[in-house]
Image (cartoon, rainbow, N blue to C red):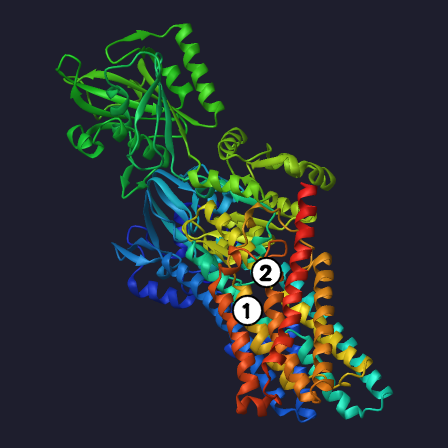
Amino acid sequence: MTEKLSVDTTWYALDIDEVATRLDVDPAQGLSAAEAQKRLQEYGPNELAAAKTEPTWLRFLKHYRDYMQIVLVVAAGVSLIIHEYKTAVGLFLLTLFNAWLGYHQEGKAEAAAASLGRMMKSTAKVRRGGEIVELDAEQIVPGDIVVVDAGDRVPADGRIILAATLQIEEGALTGESVAVEKDVATIYSADVAIGDRLDMAFMNTNVTRGHGEILVTTTGMGSEVGHIADLLSEQKVEKTPLTKQVDRLTIFIIIAALFAFVAIVIMGLVQGESFTVLFGIGVALAVGSIPDALPAVVTTILSVGSVNMAKKNAIMKVLPAVETLGSTSAINSDKTGTLTLNQMTVREVTTVQHHYSVTGEGYSFEGQVQLTDGVAERDLDYVMFSCALCNDSDIRDGQVIGDPTEGALYVLAEKGGVDVREFRRTYPRVASVPFDSDYKFMATFHRMPGDDGSPVIRAYVKGAPDVLLSRSSTVRMSAERSDLFTDETRAKVLAENERIAGQGRRVLALAQREFDAATFDPSGDMMRLMTDLQLTALIGEVDPPRAEAVAAIAEAKRAGIRVRMITGDHAVTAAAIADELGIEGRAVTGAEFAAMSDAEADASVDTIGVIARVAPEHKVRLVEVLKRKGNIVAMTGDGVNDAPAIAAADIGIAMGITGTDVAKGAAKMILADDNFATIIAAVAEGRLVYDNLQKFIRIQVANLYMFILAFIGSSAFAIAGTALLSPAQVLWIHLAVVAPIGAVMGLDLATPGIMDRKPRPFNQPIIVRSMMLRLLGAGIYMAAATLIIVQIGKTTYGSLEVGQTMAIVGLSLMNIFLALNLRYPEESAFGASTFSNPKLLWAFAWAVVGSILITQTKALQELFATVPLTATQWGICLVPGVVLLLLGELLKLVLRARRRRAA
C-alpha cells in the first residue's frame, strides 16, 4: 500500500471507488482494529512532527556562546595561570550560574508552550469494523472513515465520500473567512488550488454546517498542514534586537577592558614593575571592568517579564522576545477572533416601516431589540419565529454549534423573547429545503396556528436578499397586515440592503408563506412551493469588535504603535470594522498591494490601515516592507496561512485557543486568550523590561568607566601604582554591591508614563550617546574620588590598606547615590518615587551593612585584606556620594528645564 499513498497523489481527481480501492478499505465497514493498528505502526501517529530536541548537555553549553560568558571563562583561566585560585573559582561558579539560569528559564518558557499544546488535543468519530467509535485524532490512519458534523474539527486530509449540506471553514489553511460548501463530485483537473478542492477536507479545518464522511488519504506530516510545517522547520532563527544590542555592548566593554589592560602594562613596565605583577593587576582590572553578572541579570529580568506576561495570558517561547515586543512599532493583526469576537452578532433588524437596533455581543443572550425608527409594533414574533425555526444551529455554554450566521439569529430570537429550544419542540419541522449555494436560501415547514387559530403549515425562509425579493409577491407591513410589492417598496428594500451592506455587515432576508394543513404533502417537491413569499425583514449581522480591542488600539496609538488589520474578508467589510476599531488608513486588497513595486509599497504603506482579501505572500511582503522602513514588526495570526508571516516578523504572535499547531510553532509568543488587548498589555511589560534593563546597564557602565579610569589614574599619578585594588576587593564591589543594586533596579517598578513614549528606533543602542556621556562623567567623578580616598589613606593614615578599605566603603556608598541618580534620569530622587520600591531600599541597606561587615569582621578582613575604619574615616567615605547625588540633581534640573522649553 506504500506506493498507493504517494504524497503527490491527486486524490481530488479520483472517483470515490478508486480512492477506496487504492486505500484498500470498504467505506461501509471501515478498517478493522487489527488493520488500523498495522497501519499506525507503518505510518506513525497522526500528528505534526515535534521540533528536534537537543540533548540537555548541549542546551546547557549553548549558554557559553554568549560573549560575556567567554570573557568570564578566559578570565577564570588566566586567574588559574597566575595562581589567583579564589578569583578563578568565583568566576567559574559565576559562569555555571549564568548558564544554569538561562537553561532553566528557557525550559520554563518551553514547558508553558507545551502545556498549552496539550490543552488542544482533539478526538474524532471513526468507523472501525462497521461501528462508530471515538478515538484520539493521533490514532487515525490512512483508510479510516471519519464522520464529521457541525462543530467538529477535521483530523486529517481526506476525500469526501458523503456530504449533506456540508460546509467547512478553511481559513486556517487558506485565509478565507467564509465557509466552503463541500460535495463529493470528482474534480477532473490537474493543479487545482487547495481552496478549490471541494471534494477534499483538510487537517485542522472546522465543520460549520451539515454532516459528512471523509475517507482519510494522508495523515500527520503528509497532510497539507504538515507540508507547511516542514517548510517552516527549515527557517533560520535570527537573533532578537536585544540579543544583538547586548552583544554589541559586550564587545564595547571587552575592547575598553583590553585597552585599559594594555595601558596598565605599558605604564607599569615604564615604571619598572615586573610583567607577572602587571599581568595579575590586569586580571583584576578585567574583573572590575566587565559586568560579571550581566548574563544572569539579563536572563532574570527577561524571565520575570515572561512570568508577568504569562499572568496576563501572553506566553513567551523565547526569552529575548520579551523585550522585542516592548520595542514594537508596528502590529499587523488578524481580524477574526483577535480584533473581533469571532462571534457573529445581529446589529439591526429592518422591516419596510420600522428599524430596530440590537444590543449585546456575541453568543450571550444579554441584550435588547430597540426601536430606532418608525412607530412601535405590538410584537416582532413574525421575525423572531423565523430566526428560531429556520435555523440548524444551537448555542451551548456560550458557544455556537453549527453555522455562526445562524447562531446570531438564534441569539436574536432569544433576545426577542423566544425560548428557542422549547419553541422548536412545540413546533417541529415537518419538511425542509436545505440551504444550497446554487439557490442561496433555506426553508423549514412547521404546523402552527394561523391568524384565525386554525392550523396551517407555515414556511419560514431565510437567504440572500436579492433571491428572496425575486421570489416574494407581498411584503409584511406590520404584525397585522401585508401588502403587495410595489416598485416603491422594492426600491426601498434594495436601498436598505445596500445601506446595511455598505456598513460592512452581512445581510440576510427573512420571508414566510402559509399552506393549508389539510392538503400539505411533506413528501412533495418543496422547491415548487418557494414562490409568492411574503418578505418580512432584513437582518444585518457582523462579527463585532472586541470592546477591549478598541481601547487597546487607542492605547497603542498613544504609545506610537501603528496597528494594521489583515483579513480575508472583503474590503468594504474590513474597512467598516477598522473604522469601529479606530484603525487609521485606507483599505486595499491583497492583489492591489501585490501589484505595487517595492518603491510604491514603501511610499504607500504609511497610508494603508487594512489589507483585505489577503494571501499568505501578501502578509509576508507587508512584514518585509515595514521592516525595511525601520520598524520592529509584530504579526498575529492563527492559521497555517499566517505562519510564514509570523515567522518573518520580529515578534510572531499565535492564538492559543484557535491557533493551529503550525502557527504556534512559528511564533515567539502565544496568546492564551486570543485577545488583542493582551498584546498591548504585553507591550507595556516589554517596555518595562527594557527600561529596567537600561537601569541595570547604566550602573554597570558607570562602574566600568570608574574602574578603568581609576586603575589608569593610579598608575599615571603614582598613587598606588598598579595595585589600586586586589582582584578579591574588585569582586566584592561587583558581586556584593553593584550586582544586588543593579539586579533590583533591573526588576524595578514601571516608570511613570512608560506607554506615552514613542517606540525606540530599532537600531538605537541600549545606552544612547547622551546617556553614555553622562555615565562617563559619573565614572570620571567616581574614579577621581576613589583615587583621592586612597591617597588620603596612604598619606593621612599612613597605610595603603586603610586607603583601599576606605575606597571599598566609598565606592559602596557612591553606588547607592549613583543608583538614585540613574534610576529616573530626569526625575528628582527627592520624591515619593525613591520609596516606591522597598526591595531597592533593602539593596541600599545591604550595601551599608556589607561595608560594615567587610571592615569590622575578622574573617572578611583576612579574606579581602581590609582594616577597621574610624567614624572620621567613614565620614570621609560618605562625602563623595552626597556630592554625587547633588550634582545629579543639578543636572536633572537643567534637563527638566530644557524639556519644558522644548514642549
Nearer the observer, 459 or 646: 646
What residue is at 60 percent from the left and 37 percent from the top? 590
355 vs 75, left or right, is left
794 vs 158, left or right, is right
- Choose mark 2 or mark 1, whichever is in front: 2
Residue kind at label 2, given as amino acid type:
Arg
What residue is at 60 percent from the left and 78 percent from the top? 874
Residue kind at label 1, given as amino acid type:
Ala
What residue is at 59 percent from the left and 44 percent from the top? 619
Name above or below for residue 109 compared with residue 371. below
Mark sitting earlier along the chain (2/1)? 1
Q: Position of residue 661 (x, y in %)?
A: 46, 56
Q: Are marks 2 and 1 in contact (CB under 8 Å)?
A: no
> Which corner quadrant of the image does residue 871 belong to?
bottom right
Name above or below for residue 471 compared with residue 649. above
| Distance between mark 2 and mark 1 Cα atoms | 12 Å
Outermost residue on the right side: it is: 270
